[in-house]
Image: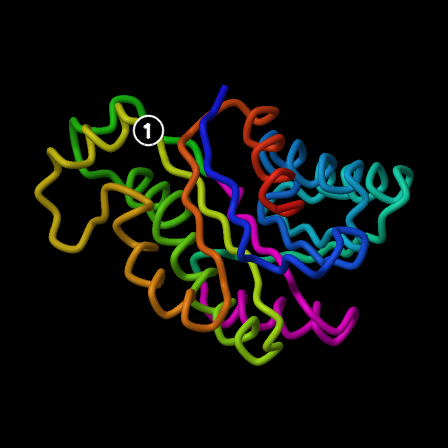
Amino acid sequence: MLNHEPSRTFHGDVPISEKVCLVTGGGQARGKAIAEALARAGTKTVAITYSDDREEAHQVYVNIQTIGSGCLLAHMDVTDRPSVRQVLVWIKDQVGKIDVLVNADTAPWPDPIDSTLTDECVQAVNVNISGQALTSDEMLPFMSIQKTGGLMVGVAVEDEVMMALKTIAEPGLPSSVAAVISPMTALAASRGITLRVLPAGRPEELAEVVVGLVNG
């Protein structure tokens, strides 16, 4: 079971039934588990994004609507700032706000990671680590304008992956999610936005923790 400390400062006066949650990577196992768990918990709207797994994401979209929550579905590249910004604007145009961001998009790690700095390794870092920072950075001003607080959740990569990445002598290549998201913490807090980075875990465990935070 993952350990976490629920935030009691985020959106305490807004019930989950009025919250709009954005989950990236909605067509993947982690994103699917989190998005559907939020729907079962009674979230008003769950927006999910996909990269190249549209069919899987569309099935999650159908599942969420069947559960009873509203759902939005959009293609988004978490490594491309204009793509992220366009989707955030679209979601706000559709439902008026975004209360929660969960960075669940993933890309496979090459095996082995630390043998050679391959294009696959760089792409995995861009999605699994840098993409979380980029999406959170774009989300911060959106939540700030709303003036009602918000929650942004990142998910760390496995310890063995971080250790492997630290052996790669590539300038500017981040080895952890915390390293790229933590610098936003103070600014986020000053605007009533809670930022959490969860440890890596099974999709169902992560989904349970996220629902607890959103309900917090």
Answer with the quarter of the image where residue 94 lies.
Answer: bottom right
Answer with the quarter of the image where residue 208 lies.
Answer: top right
Image x and y of residue 35, in percent: 69, 41
| Secondary structure of residue under mark 1 | loop
Q: Which residues are magenta?
A: 80-106
Image x and y of residue 11, in percent: 62, 60
Tell me the residue at 24%/38% (across/down).
118
When the figure is inspected, residue 63 is found, relative to residue 50, above or below; the finding is above
Q: Name, please, the residue furthest toward the bottom.
A: 145
Q: Left of 86 or right of it: where is 138?
A: left
Tell me the residue at 68%/50% (across/down).
48
Q: Left of 82 or right of it: where is 22?
A: right
Image x and y of residue 180, in percent: 29, 54
How many other residues sit within 10 Å of disc 1, few (<14), some (14-19) or many (≥20)? some
Residue 6 or residue 58, whichever sits in front = 6
When the figure is inspected, residue 92 is found, relative to residue 34, above or below; the finding is below
Q: How many marks?
A: 1
Q: Left of 162 or right of it: where is 104?
A: right
- The residue carrying mark 1 is 110
Residue 93 counted in the magenta span: yes
Image x and y of residue 167, in percent: 11, 33
Residue 171 counted in the magenta span: no
